[in-house]
Image (tube, rainbow, N blue to C red):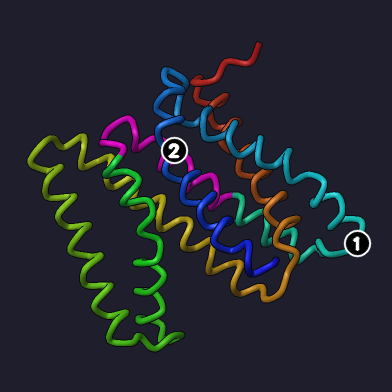
Amino acid sequence: MNHRLTPLVLLVGVVSIAFAAIFFKLAAPTHPLVAAGVRLVIASILLSPFTFRGLRNGNLSPKILKAAAIAGVLYALHFGLWVSSLSYTTVAASVTLVTATPLFLASIAVVTGTDKPTPRLGFALILATAGVVVIGGTDLGTSRLALFGDALALAGAFAIALYMLLVRSLGDIDIWSFAGVATGVGGGLLLSTAVATGTFAMP
């Protein structure tokens, strides 16, 4: 990627994340599993040219396909938990907590010793943890349902942290074709779960 495009790509990413929760809220009364599943299926369709190219070029080996399937499960957990959290807590709390993925990644790195934290990182971890505690404490005073929503959002953040660790362990891969498979698996899991639980009736 052209490094001059990096700021633009980051801006688009931040705006997309910022508005995603609002769009999911507007999708009500669509069940969270259905909304999250459709979102992943759309992503899978958009990425399908890269997926087919990866299969044709041999970039999606059996090992990578297996990892992509596991990543799809983590995608399903991430989006299913996060979108469900919006039914219980505020958009602000949900988005703040579901983007706490760096907190989990840094904590795992510290515990496993894979990365040595700098003093600045240590301060950031303390600050981020304090923020999570403040949000949780505030919602606990509001309602236990809001606290439950916070827990769902945090669990979603942890799921995507595991996804990132999985991708990192694979080294240099065709991330576009990998993501195409992962989103397809994740979307399929969410929609099939919605059908199995009766929250999405097939015509």
Give amino acid for label 2. Answer: Phe
Q: Is 60 placed left or right of 134 in the picture? A: right
The residue lying toward the viewer, choosing from 46 and 16, is 16
> Could you tell me which residue is drawn at 92 percent across and 56 percent down?
56
As helix, strand or loop, the secondary structure at mark 1 comes to: helix
Q: Residues within 10 Å of mark 2 (few under 14, many from 20)?
A: few
Span colored in magenta: 73-91
- Up the image or down, 43 lies above or below 34; here it is below
Residue 158 place in picture, x, y as percent: 41, 58
**Which residue is labeled 1 in the image?**
57
- Up the image or down, 80 lies above or below 126; here it is above
As helix, strand or loop, the secondary structure at mark 2 comes to: helix
Quarter holding residue 6: bottom right
Residue positioned most to the front: 4
Q: Is 18 placed left or right of 43 in the picture? A: left
Give amino acid for label 1. Answer: Asn
**Which residue is labeled 2 in the image?**
19
Residue 193 place in picture, x, y as percent: 55, 32
Residue 202 place in picture, x, y as percent: 63, 16
Q: How far is the residue under mark 1 from the one under mark 2? A: 36 Å
> Could you tell me which residue is drawn at 74 percent across and 46 percent down?
47
Q: Is residue 83 magenta?
A: yes
